[in-house]
Image: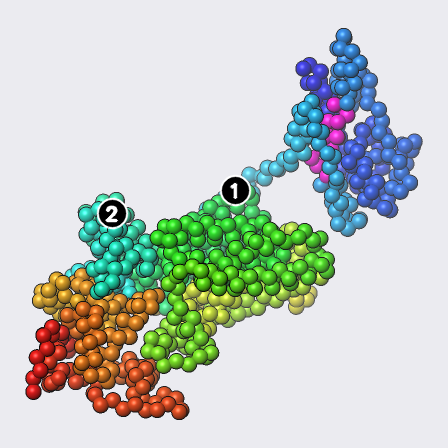
Amino acid sequence: MGGGRNRVRVRDRIRKVYLTVPSSSLSGNSKVTKSTLHLPPSPSLRTALGRGCRGAISPVSPLTPEGAAPGSQPLPCRRTRLTRPPLPAPGTLVPGRPGTRLAKTPEGAGPEVGARRRAQGRRSLPAAREPQGARPLLRGAMAEEEGPAIELRQRKKPKSSENKESAKEEKINDTPVTERLPKHVLFQRFAKIFIGCLAAVTSGMMYALYLSAYHERKFWFSNRQELEREITFQGDSAIYYSYYKDMLKAPSFGRGVYELTHNNKTVSLRTINAVQQMSLYPELIASVLYQATGSNEIIEPVYFYIGIVFGLQGIYVSALFVTSWLMSGTWLAGMLTVAWFIINRVDTTRIEYSIPLRENWALPYFACQIAALTGYLKSNLNTYGERFCYLLMSASTYMFMMMWEYSHYLLFLQAISLFLLDNFSLEQSDKIHEVYKIYIFSLFLGYLLQFENSALLVSPLLSLIVVLMLVKCLQPNVKKRTFVAKIMKVINFHLVCTLTVTLNIIMKVFVPHNENEHMLKFLEVKLGLNMTKNFTMNWLLCQESLQAPSQEFFLRLTQSSLLPFYILVLIICFLSMVQVIFRRFNGESLEETVTLEDGRIGERPEVIYHVIHTIFFGSLAMIIEGLKYLWTPYVCMLAAFGVCSPELWTTLFKWLRLRTVHPVLLALILSMAVPTIIGVSLWKEFFPRLMTELTELQEFYDPDTVELMTWIKRQAPVAAVFAGSPQLMGVIKLCTGWMVTSLPLYNDDDLLKRNENIYQIYSKRSAEDIYKILTSYKANYLIVEDAICNEVGTRRGCRVKDLLDIANGHVVCEEGDKLTYSKYGRFCHEVKINYSPYVNYFTRVYWNRSYFVYKINTVISFQS
């Protein structure tokens, strides 16, 4: 044991002497001193020098040829023979501290022990003779003269058990030691991160408080009764909030979940799994939090519900802040992102109109997922940062998928963006395939917790991820940046596209599902690939949110200076990305770290991902205006990142070949001056408007609907079933709890068919036909809305009665179609006159200025 410790000391002394060689001896023109001749070189180092250099010996090497005189210049490497001096004899002095001697072989140990120890010493000496700083210095010096650095070949580790200890020591010696940064640098970084995080949290909290104050001013919410508050939830928002109320009324959480999964009190003649079909996980979570935190004694349920949604919107803004901050490196970009988001609030969110919408619950998690993905794709992220981003990305992806039934379509677009990033070899494939594993895990867990939702199995996201994982396993190992590698990339791209479509078709054939087939038909009609007279398709096409964006939308973005800067940033990033892709395909290797002076912002993988992703979202927003709520927040984030990024301005100046002023200096100035000027102009123009919105008192006044709900709760039987427009049925379900015939949901084919049939009360059909339709759904009361019956729309042909006439063939919509005349008047007009045969089937029981309520007679009495 004593001999082993002495050998370790000797190796440490030799390594210390080697590290004390002055830096001047490592320069190209320096002369090697005599003392350095006694340092035994590493065999791996000698091999690398002999094979790597061709003209002159590497200036890093402290070795001289055998027999050379001290102070003489080194000979060329091809004619140089490097020798290794023998080890000093035991008991002799070695270079290092005074008095250090080699250990002697113990007496009686025999020559075998001495030979074995000398062999172990020779095997372990290379680790000591190659200190931590030697290899980087060698690579750097050879890179300057020879081009690319030559990787040193490592010796095979000994497999014998007696050499395990020496192998471990070699591994420990080869481990790089991180240098400690100065205290003032650490303090600056900490202060920057602290201020940025504080600004992000403050921005989110201020935005949440702003939404709460604006909602109070707009609806005068605190001074309303409960019924008047609930009427403010319109359409499908009313349905979502009604189930939140049902969960609070349930005797226990388990019983409430059971009643929602086996719900037969909402739609007549149907038992539905409301949790799966309507994605009611937000309501389940809100009800649990409300009861678990004891908030029922502090705050009303409606305030708790909308408070959670407003809090999520604050997280949404904070996530956009962090994303822009990560990309630009300054929290000033985050502040500009938040300013643009709030100013263009009409085009960035629908929180003002419909609070309980699924997207208002889901998009904050999607923003957090994008922020985590942005940090995960960064090249200079440390191990702990990657783990944190990976965990945050996993949790937010799963939550996003659980909150919205359409979330897997957005993740499909994100997966395509990552696939293109991987196919261009602009980022390590391992990172992107780890993201694919997150998708697989989220789909599998979502399938189980969403009651085996078959829509996730036939999702294009699952087909794409399975194909990508399969292709990666079957992909052969080909040398990079060769012609064969380029051909393989083209084949790989075509194979992924073909197999994804094929697998998705096969899954839809063999897996029973209730996927939204009407969405494909809608897209066909929207893109002009097909024509239809179907009422549902034409009614969806006439909805404002499903039409192409209007000119006012682009005008608003231009007035806030958002659209011009976004276009500028997108063009620069896209052209730089294309330039990098061409360089990559031409065989040029990308640098691991891109400096500010390089001016190549397109080499950053997170920038390339965001450029591809925003192009996808922008293309969809140009087709359907409702998707602008996905694209416009992206526009705010990307534009703010660009104007605050010195690297983007440097890229532009490099292209312009600016010589009068140093490009880096001008880029640093503009990255601070441009966002400051934008912020000051936005403050002067839009801040007074925001304050005016908070000071003005508005009022939501709908007395006719309040009277109708009051009459239903007082006069209608508990088991009554109401029929009418889907939007009104949602309000009736929320305010009264009575059963209805249809719901304002458009992800179920049966509900869409019900809506079309119930809307026939505004068509030119006979009283008998309407009576048969209503009794087939066990309806007891019919509600006719005067606003729909006497609708005067700005677009003729998009009114409900016009669409019904086209679907029933009562008007000519195309050349060659035959006009079918109806001998009956419009039902909603005729039933108000109270003459036979209408009074035989329907009896008016209540009316006001907006609504007419008719009881459907169970016994038909024909009157003359």
The number of numbered discs placed on residues in the rendered structure image is: 2
Query: Is residue 126 inside the magenta stretch?
Result: yes
Q: In the picture shown, does residue 4 fall above or below 352? A: above
- Would you call the spot at circle 2 few (<14 residues within 10 Å), some (14-19), or many (20 or more)? some
Q: In the picture shown, does residue 381 fall above or below 727? A: above
Residue 127 figure quarter = top right
What residue lies at 40% left-to-right and 57% top-to-bottom? 454
Residue 260 position in % (x across, y down): 26, 55
Q: Nearer the viewer, residue 750 or 180?
A: 750
**Whether residue 588 can be seen here:** no
Q: Which residues are magenta?
A: 120-135
Q: Nearer the viewer, residue 240 or 200?
A: 240
Q: Looking at the image, is mark 1 or mark 2 earlier in the sequence?
A: 2
Residue 32 figure quarter = top right
Q: Nearer the viewer, residue 255 or 338?
A: 255
693 sits to left or right of 608? left
What residue lies at 37% left-to-right and 72% top-to-bottom? 545
Residue 731 position in % (x across, y down): 22, 66
On residue 253, the disc is 2
- Would you call the spot at circle 1 few (<14 residues within 10 Å), some (14-19), or many (20 or more)? few
- The kind of residue tagged 1 is Tyr
What residue lies at 72% left-to-right and 60% top-to-bottom? 483
- The kind of residue tagged 2 is Phe
